[in-house]
Image (tube, helix red, strand yellow):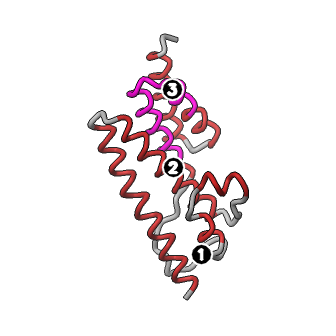
Amino acid sequence: AFINSFQAKRAHIQANMQTTMQQAATALDTKDYGQAITLYSEAIRDTRLLIHHDSGEMATGEEAGQLGAHTMMLNAGPHPVDDDNNSAPKVTVADLASLYTSRASAYLGNEQEHFALADITTVLSLEPGDAALVQALIVRAKVHIAGGR
């Protein structure tokens, strides 16, 4: 019963994350940069939480606080989730990198180049793979152009 409850909670977090990502993309497309930043931040938090849990490690201290209220429930579950009945795809570092890159674009649209550059620096530190890396470098170039560098 506990594993089913845990899987339901994880599935809920992942479904909420997907909805939030879609809403964030719409906000970015309509140039509602403040809303896009807020929504991407929520999706980043949930993605980090799921990646952290899937790695089999438990969040502690300050990190647990940053990851939010779902941390305790997910920390209590089996590590990592490997049930064959769990059809939800695992989130990856590339997914996280994509969210940071999108939020950087929103920051850039909101003329907050320093925050955009911080997100791109985070992406580069994640070593996400070629496609995500190229997108991050494109946004970084746009940040430098906007900043007059």
What residue do we see at 43% from left, 43% from top? 38
Please determine whether, in this image, residue 138 is positioned above or below residue 2. Answer: above
Figure quadrant of residue 65 = bottom right
Residue 2 horizontal side relative to residue 13, left or right: right
Residue 44 horizontal side relative to residue 67, left or right: left
Instruction: Give the label, 3 or 2, closer to the camera.
Output: 2
Nearer the observer, 78 or 115: 115
* Residue under numbered circle 2: 44
* Residue under numbered circle 1: 82
Query: Please, what is the three-letter code of the amino acid marked with disc 2?
Result: Ile
Please determine whether, in this image, residue 93 is positioned above or below residue 58. Answer: above
Q: Earlier in the sequence, mark 3 or mark 2?
A: 2
Regarding mark 1 in the picture, which secondary structure is present there? loop
What residue do we see at 57% from left, 57% from top? 68
Regarding mark 3 in the picture, which secondary structure is present there? helix
Question: Between marks 3 and 2, how big is the CA–CA gap?
Answer: 19 Å
Instruction: Give the label, 2 or 1, closer to the camera.
Output: 2
Please determine whether, in this image, residue 149 is positioned above or below residue 32. Answer: above
Query: Please, what is the three-letter code of the amino acid marked with disc 3?
Result: Arg
- The residue most toward the left is 30
What residue do we see at 44% from left, 69% from top? 12
Figure quadrant of residue 70 = bottom right
Q: The magenta stretch spans which residues?
A: 95-118
Classify 10 Å Cα crowding around label 3: few (below 14), some (14-19), many (20 and above). Answer: many
Question: Between marks 2 and 1, how big is the CA–CA gap?
Answer: 23 Å
* Residue under numbered circle 3: 140
